[in-house]
Amino acid sequence: MENLVSSVVIKDSGIQFGTSGARGLVEQFTSNVCAAFTHAFITSIQIEFSFKQVAIAIDNRPSSLTMAQACAKALHQKGLEVIYYGVVPTPALAYVSMQDNIPCIMVTGSHIPFDRNGLKFYRPDGEISKADELAILNANVKFEAITDLPLLIESDKAARQYSERYTSLFDSQMLTGKRIGIYEHSSAGRDLYAPMFEALGAEVIALERSDEFVPIDTEAVSDSDKKKAKVWSKEYDLDFIFSTDGDGDRPLVADENGDWLRGDILGLLCADVMNIDALVVPVSCNTVIESCERFNHVTRTKIGSPYVIAEFEALSKQNASVAGFEANGGFLLGSDVFFDKKTIKALPTRDAVLPALMLLGAARQKKIYELVNSLPKRFTYSDRIQNFATEKSAVIIRELKENPTVFLAKIGFYNVDVITIDTTDGVRMLLSNSNIIHLRASGNAPELRCYTEANNQKLAMNYLHKVFKFLGEN
């Protein structure tokens, strides 16, 4: 039997960690590569934790089951019992595993195209850190090459406990009279959401389930999805549309008019309803978070849930409640929160359901669009250029850092100065007209992302289109 070394196998695969989890092409995630990551992960946390079981779940990508089987085989090689939860949202797997005090592995590429996939790792106390990622990459664990894959027997425990987390939190009539559309596509949670909303009194209309994987990116909503929401809202007289990305940790919600909400606006409204004291958000989020003056403290980080989570411990020492969210809408609860005479247990990983339900709860008094309009008028827009070479992105970012004014002039911004530059993640420029342009290379795929911010939506869109037009021509 051939013996392999985890660090060598991982290095040869070309797979690296992105903003959340290891990501790469499906062809790179061979059975031995999945096993190498699994052996390295388990070995790196066994120093600190004692456990006999490890949980696994998957998304609906065609490649995910085989990858899960390879991970399970590696766990069997280490003498560990595998609990398989089938297709469930990432936060469902993370939640049940934290309650059981065991580690888990989620096989998912989240929102990236189906020809790619990934692995997310969770310690018994939650999502791994950047230090844990390095430990996994550098571990030198010897293991036998994978020659056969085990049959996985599915348990429904994760799905049940995740649903109960929310249905038990709210009154069973909270959504009575609401018509909610569930844009199902290929989301890992599509079988859970309708029963969950129905248990709270809503009338649910299922929308566009897909047998093929659909890479929904909640930060770069396609024009076709924008049109669909408008049509569905009118056709079915909907009060709300709910959807997620592929693994169900990033929400996509639309108001009574079929307008999709920006993820950071959704997160802000959720945190406000929950009376969160301190927030952690990535640098790409809307500055209305600070200007609305609804929170005692706001910390900004690099983009990626591990960076957000890393700030929770320090803030928890000085604040009664701590949470975070990202521009993609994923909401991370960093502490237990007492809400409506009940305790919501911490879930320090991205979640799509909590912010949606909190918004619906607030919408019992006001329309969703009225809640959004109550905020200071500050608008963001974002999109990505796909298949944009990482090396090309690096050149652009370097040029921006060295001489941003010259670069802006090339794009066509002549009568504006750069007031401040934030290089926390890429280059984020505050301009003399108070608008913001932020460019960064994606950590998950060969893409260049742009975020713009202005005092009206049209201007934010125009800024982004102007940047992309220039980059597309050069």
Image (cartoon, helix red, strand yellow):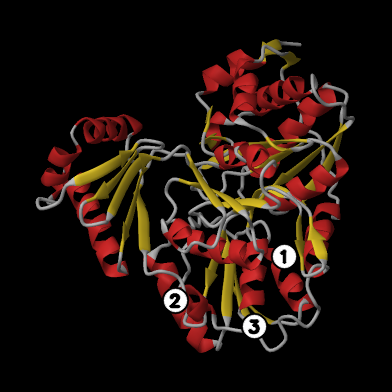
Q: Does label 1 or label 3 sit earlier along the sequence?
A: 1
Location of residue 101 (image quadrant):
top right
Judge by depth and name the residue closer to the eye, 174 or 89.
174
Q: CA distance from mark 3 to mark 2?
A: 16 Å
- Residue in the picture at 80% in, 77% down: 171
Judge by depth and name the residue closer to the eye, 274 or 445.
274
Mark linked to residue 92: none
Quarter of the picture containing the C terminus is top left
Quarter of the picture containing the N terminus is top right
Given contact means CB atoms under 8 Å apart, are the residues at marks 2 and 1 in contact? no
Vertical side of 242 occupied by 397: above or below: above
Is residue 461 visible in the rendered structure shown here? Answer: yes
- Residue at the spot of label 3: 364
Q: Amino acid at mark 3?
A: Arg
Q: Does label 3 or label 2 sit earlier along the sequence?
A: 3
Q: Secondary structure at mark 1?
A: helix
Picture coordinates of residue 182, whole percent (x, y) = 61, 72
- Residue at the spot of label 1: 191
Picture coordinates of residue 297, whole percent (x, y) = 55, 50
Q: CA distance from mark 1 to mark 3?
A: 26 Å
Direction from residue 144 to residue 296 in the image, left or right: left
Mark 3 neighbour density, 10 Å: few (under 14) some (14–19) many (20 or more): few
Q: Secondary structure at mark 3?
A: loop
Is residue 87 visible in the rendered structure shown here? Answer: no
Given contact means CB atoms under 8 Å apart, are the residues at marks 1 and 3 in contact? no
Q: Does label 2 or label 1 sit earlier along the sequence?
A: 1
Mark 2 neighbour density, 10 Å: few (under 14) some (14–19) many (20 or more): few
Picture coordinates of residue 170, whole percent (x, y) = 78, 72
Given contact means CB atoms under 8 Å apart, are the residues at marks 3 and 2 in contact? no
- Residue at the spot of label 2: 373
Q: Secondary structure at mark 2?
A: helix
